[in-house]
Image (cartoon, rainbow, N blue to C red):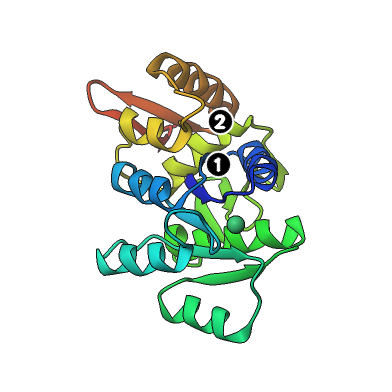
């Protein structure tokens, strides 16, 4: 899943982006409101983390404009302003959640997961596919109660496959969730990650089938 972080505090932006990337999200950082708006025009994001005090265009203006355009992605406001009026106006303008700085990282991560779960999983906490159970709260796949050890990239691929059960996921969609401005993920790298993921799933009767020219689909192997 791809997150846009609109934050002009470079130190905070870099730290937060590292933590989120480590968790398997693709993260882009925009340091001004104008840069953030341009990024939102160009890329389909799953979540916007929005600082209010941004140069060139503040977060409130940016939020107002993106909702007016009908962009529905979840928005989490992250700001040093904690006056009641600011919280209320942010939420009234269509923000989905609000956190004030300084914040505790685990709480921010939990709120991000909650927003994405609502958006991507319809609030479901567990999704079952054959013997595989994917917990959307902890983003942990388990089989028979034992968690499967995956790299951040393998996890992100499995996640998008589980979100689109029964459907074909094409390489562009996978590239979109794995790439950010700093790392361009090649089709070759995706192929390698899928190969590794398949090796870990196949002993349990689940495979990822390549459908020529179209993409991939997660399937149960018929006995
Ligand atoms: Ca700021």
- Asked if residue 141 shows in the view, the reply is no
- Badge 1: residue crowd in 10 Å (few <14, some 14–19, many ≥20): many
Q: Give the x, y percent position of residue 169.
A: 33, 36
Query: Which disc is residue 191 wearing?
Result: none
Q: Distance between the Cα atoms at labels 2 and 1?
A: 11 Å
| Side of 176 relative to 53 (left or right) | left
Q: Give the x, y percent position of residue 89.
A: 48, 81
Q: Give the x, y percent position of residue 32.
A: 47, 49
Helix, strand or loop for disc 1? loop
User: Relative to residue 170, is residue 187 depicted above or below?
Assistant: above
Query: Which disc is residue 154 wearing?
Result: 2
Q: Nearer the viewer, mark 2 or mark 1?
A: 1
Q: Nearer the viewer, residue 125 or 133?
A: 125
Residue drawn at x 41%, y 18% as measured from the top left: 186
- Residue 61: which quarter of the image? bottom left
**In the image, ligand 1 is in what quadrant?**
bottom right
Residue drawn at x 66%, y 76% as measured from the top left: 82
| Side of 197 relative to 181 (left or right) | right
Q: Nearer the viewer, residue 205 or 21?
A: 21
Q: Which residue is under mark 1?
A: 25
- Asked if residue 149 shows in the view, the reply is yes
């Amino acid at each position: 899943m791809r997150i846009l972080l609109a934050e002009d505090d470079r130190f905070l932006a870099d730290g937060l982006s590292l933590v989120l990337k480590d968790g398997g999200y693709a993260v882009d950082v925009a340091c001004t409101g104008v840069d953030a708006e341009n990024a939102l025009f160009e890329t389909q994001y799953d979540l916007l983390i929005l600082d209010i005090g941004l140069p060139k265009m503040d977060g409130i203006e940016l939020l107002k404009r993106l909702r007016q355009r009908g962009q529905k992605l979840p928005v989490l406001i992250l700001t040093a302003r904690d006056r009641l009026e600011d919280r209320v106006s942010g939420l009234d303008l269509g923000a989905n959640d609000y956190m004030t700085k300084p914040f505790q990282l685990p709480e921010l991560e939990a709120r991000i997961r909650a927003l994405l779960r609502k958006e991507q999983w319809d609030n479901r906490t567990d999704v079952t596919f054959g013997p595989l159970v994917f917990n959307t709260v902890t983003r942990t796949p388990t089989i028979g109660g034992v968690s499967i050890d995956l790299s951040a990239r393998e996890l992100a691929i499995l996640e998008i496959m589980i979100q689109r059960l029964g459907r074909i996921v094409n390489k562009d969609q996978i590239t979109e969730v794995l790439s950010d401005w700093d790392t361009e993920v090649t089709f070759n790298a995706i192929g390698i990650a899928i190969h590794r993921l398949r090796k870990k799933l196949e002993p349990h009767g689940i495979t990822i089938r390549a459908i020529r020219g179209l993409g991939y689909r997660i399937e149960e192997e018929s006995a």
